[in-house]
Amino acid sequence: MHIPDGFISTGTAAVSWLASAGSVGYAVRRVNRQLGERQVPLMGVTAAFIFAAQMMNFTVAGGTSGHLLGGALAAILLGPWAGMLVLTSVLVVQALLFQDGGLVALGANVLNMAVIGVLVGWVVYTGLRRLLSDRPWATWVSGFAAAWLSVVIASLAAAVELAVSGTSPWGVALPAMGLVHMLIGIGEGLITVAVLAFLRVTRPDLLTLYQKAQGA
Amino acid sequence: MDLVKKRWWIIGLLLALIVAFLSPLASPHPDGLERVAEDHGFLERAREAPYQLIPDYLFPGIENEAAATITAGVVGTLLIFGLMYGLAWVLRQRTQSHGS
């Protein structure tokens, strides 16, 4: 859902730039105080994987495709602040080098996917984990729900920006973006759970790296 | 085994590169936002980027489309890894110098 230039108005772009710059600045300050030794390479690997996975579009329905956004995955592995920086880096490189997502619209794309996508993923995952406590399937259910909802809410944020800009009426943008991303979100959920399951089998310590760093 | 434990991130990076190598298999259909823009008549509002470096994830100067996609994917994956690793490393150094 990378917004190209031309889809949103200058005013919407400016407000989004301010909101995302403020959020990313806050994330830098938070990460600054709490980054563990192994979180440095984990941030690099997570960013590299999300970039590569974002190239792997999968068909959903009616000649439409989607791809992993990775906001929930990054939040689960790295916490919300480092996760926000990972998604922001991916989006900045995509806009500057790959002309994927506009330069004027970069603030909006960071706001939707790196700020809102990551925070929604984090809140839903930690909330559900607490609710489901020790049940063996808690990780998978929470991971899937966090991934699905992060994509749907991010797409609704994009729809709001399109509507505010006068590009598409509210009654069209919100349901159209929401519905197609409810389908794409299923793919996001499946990939997120698959990565979490792979890590549980191979390196379970990496799954709890952030919680451990918080407790220390 | 010791190497695998200490250098686990190399394996993670290799897995990301494998995904980049598979990227020519990606679905060619427009994504969710493009689909909505097409169906509801605002796709033509999209403006061309002011410059083009690696547009459409095709590395310029490579005839074969799959090879161009793979090259773009590998370059991007390595670049993102280096950038993120470097940034996180700098932030961690600052963490230590604060001594908290």
Image (cartoon, helix red, strand yellow):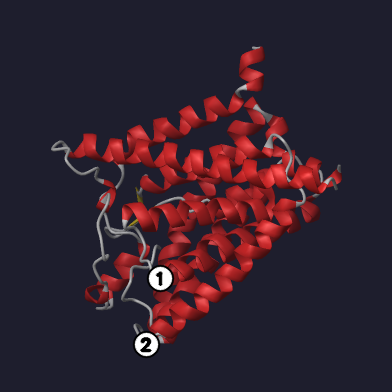
Name the residue beneath numbered marker 1.
Answer: A105
Q: Quadrant of the C terminus of chain A?
A: top right
Determine the secondary structure under disc 1: loop
Q: In the rendered image, is residue B35 in sight?
A: yes
Badge 2 or badge 1: first in the primary sequence? 1
> Label 1 amino acid?
Ala
**Among the 4 quarters of the image, the one containing residue A180:** bottom left
Vertical order, A149 against B99 (above or below) = below
Which callout, 2 or 1, points to the residue nearer the camera?
1
Vertical order, B7 against A122 (above or below) = above
- Tell whether A67 sits left or right of B49: right
**Among the 4 quarters of the image, the one containing residue A150:** bottom right
> Label 2 amino acid?
Gly
Residue A156 versus residue A180: which sits nearer the camera?
Answer: A156
Name the residue beneath numbered marker 2.
Answer: A166
Residue A48 versus residue A14: which sits nearer the camera?
Answer: A14
Query: What residue sits 58% from the left and 66% below the top?
Result: A116
Of all chains, the one bearing label 1 is: A
Residue A60 position in % (x across, y down): 36, 54
Residue A34 position in % (x across, y down): 76, 48
Vertical order, A99 against A43 (above or below) = below
Q: Which residue lies furthest to the top in this view?
A: B1
* Crowd rating for badge 1 (residues with CA inside 10 Å; few <14, some 14–19, many 20+): many
Determine the secondary structure under disc 2: loop
Query: What residue sits 45% from the left and 82% below the top?
Result: A12
Query: What residue sits 22% from the left and 34% below the top?
Result: B67
Figure label count? 2
Residue B34 position in % (x across, y down): 31, 66
